[in-house]
Image (tube, rainbow, N blue to C red):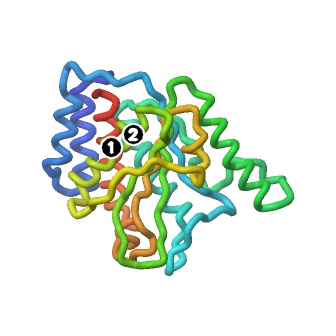
Amino acid sequence: MKDSAAIILSVLLFCTCIFGTIKQTEKNIVSVISTESSEYKDYTFILDAGHGGEDGGAVAYDGTLEKDLNLQICNNISLYFDIFGIDYVVIRDGDFSVGDTSLPTIRKRKVSDIHKRYEIINSRKNSVLLSIHQNMFSVEKYSGTQVFYDGKHKESEELSEILQFTVKDSLQPENNRKIKKTDKSIYLLYNAKRPSVMVECGFMSNPAELAKLKAYEYQSQLSFIITKGIIQFLIA
């Protein structure tokens, strides 16, 4: 594990730049990191920004594309992973599909994209999928982060519980959503051979929440809190 003092200093400086004031919840993670007995479990996180390229995902009332929010949040998470020394691989770091774009139909290209992500997830020993998405519904009133998990690995449910609690405790006290085991509709989680979770960060159909999701400060806060949950999982 990296030198504790250097990590703490980096975190304090980085968070001060983003948040202005370090809240108690942000201080708590520094305390966790500085514990001498803390050692990360041997996992590599596969950081998946959902959609990309011609697949924009959900589209908000103002034209905001899900793929862009997913990538922005994943990029923020990767910065925190770098700070805390968490091992990770990104599936995409730009606006592109990871599948075979030469295929003749959109459906075939999308299937190829999903299969390529599946291949990347399962290609690394001791990998854990962290997939970032946004929610959408026909009614505007719904809001809040919700975490989904695969039903084959106990680590998936454990991680999803930690992430859901951490978001509620640190950022969304009114969020009473529960974690949910995936069904066949979420191909990657349902079929993955490695522990897998998907964070639906918020509802693009809720104008107030969409405004938050588009704001850099909120993206940074949410990314930091997701990282906090990951660290708690890694040292539990």
- Point out which mark residue 26 bears: none
Pointer 2 and pointer 1: residues touching (CB < 8 Å)?
Answer: yes
**Left or right: where 30 falls relative to 216:** left
Q: Split into 4 quadrants, where in the image is the N terminus?
A: top left
Judge by depth and name the residue closer to the eye, 163 or 211. Answer: 163
Q: Does the image show residue 75?
A: no
Q: Split into 4 quadrants, where in the image is the C terminus?
A: top left
Q: Which residue is mark 2?
A: 157
Q: Does the image show residue 19?
A: yes
Q: Residue at x 76, y 59 (%)?
A: 107
Q: Residue at x 45, y 47 (%)?
A: 181
**Residue 86 against residue 111 in the figure, above or below:** above
* Numbered disc 1: secondary structure: helix
Q: Amino acid at mark 2?
A: Glu
The span from disc 2 to disc 1 (Cα, nearest Å) is: 6 Å
Q: Position of residue 46 (x, y in %)?
A: 52, 38
* Numbered disc 2: secondary structure: helix
Q: Residue furthest right?
A: 104
Q: Amino acid at mark 1?
A: Glu
Q: Which residue is mark 1?
A: 161
